[in-house]
Image: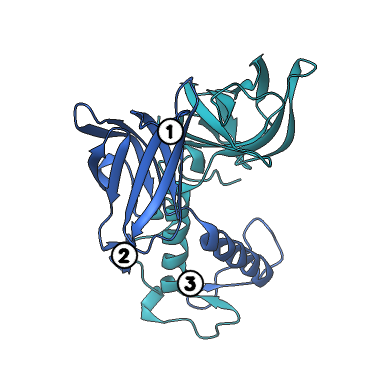
Chain colours: A blue, B cyan
Amino acid sequence: MAFGGFCPLPLRLGGNDPRDAFTAEQFSRLTADVLAMARVATFARGTCTVDGGLGTASFGFYAGLHGIGLVHAPAIAVLGVGAIRLTWNDAYTDAYQRAAATKIIHAKGSPHGAVAARVTATVSIWRQVDLLMFDAAGAPLDGTISFSVF
Amino acid sequence: MATPTGAPVWVHTNDHATYGGDVNKRNYQGQDAVNPRTDVSAQQFARLVADVAAMGNTAAWARVTFACNDAVPAVPTIDDYSAMSGTAPTPTRNGTGDVTFTWAASYTDAYGVSGAVNIVHAEATAHGTSSADGVVEIVSPTVVRVRAFDAAGVALADATLTLTVATGPV
């Protein structure tokens, strides 16, 4: 029986019947694993398309620790052909309105398509990432990019 | 048996409330944890579920490292596979350095709750000691094609790549 004298919360760890118990060992494993995953969790990932000729760029998908869906996506700016700049807010709040500053230290991207291409990802400042796509000859290339930010 | 609330995490519809969180979560009768060795407070539980929900947002659906078999044309070899659920996707060789992976339409979690797969994000990284690139193509919500190229943009034979895919809400 997991409930203690202050049922239902605080949760009292313990019990022998796995159907209604939650032991200290289980909770310790849960918290250790959650912390381990948090240390390497992706801050954000998304898929966006850039058309430097038209000066347009848009998201097809976005998910961040702060929320999933395009409404949570960073600002996107076209820098040129195959080049975009993503700018996140200074900080984001969780479901309980606790704020945490944005501090991006790593980013990577992959080109979509059927021909040779590559993407470079540069963390220009702590909340800004530049994604540049090139063709095999090293010329800027418009198209779709999937990226991850940490 | 209790059926878990919400959908499996790869469906991306869960939030902190799905896990029992609430912005007004409180300890019963305002009594905080008495003994941190045996008790979990409402505050601690709220933090736990908020962080789990956040990590669920950006977690990858699957990661597969595979080797193309081009010298002797054959189905690509999957060297390693990890995913939120299920076994490895079905690989198909399309040509030199050109592979398609096909996942099932849905998978079940540890409690038998099924969730649809809707791949919306893919990244591929080439392995090796010379310049190479992986280019992805999301063919459908369950099918991803990966092509490997060398520095000159020529299809790369017998390449090894790691593909990471993520799902989004259906």
On the same chain, marks 2 and 1? The answer is yes
First of labels 3, 1 by sequence position:
3
Picture disc at residue A7: 3
Give the letter of the chain under mark 3.
A
Q: Is residue A113 left or right of residue A53?
A: right
Quarter-wise, where is residue B76 in the image? top right
Q: Nearer the viewer, residue B114 or A106?
A: A106
Q: CA distance from mark 2 to mark 3?
A: 23 Å
Which residue is at the front of the view, A37 or B4? A37
Mark 1, secondary structure of its residue: loop
Name the residue tied to disc 2.
A96
Tell which circle, 2 or 1, labels the residue nearer the N-terminal end. 2
Instruction: Return the x and y of residue A105 as percentages of the image width and height.
Output: 43, 61
Q: In the figure, A145 relative to A20: above or below?
A: above
Q: Identify the secondary structure beneath mark 2.
A: loop
Measure the C-alpha gap from mark 3 to mark 1.
Answer: 64 Å
Give amino acid for label 3. Cys
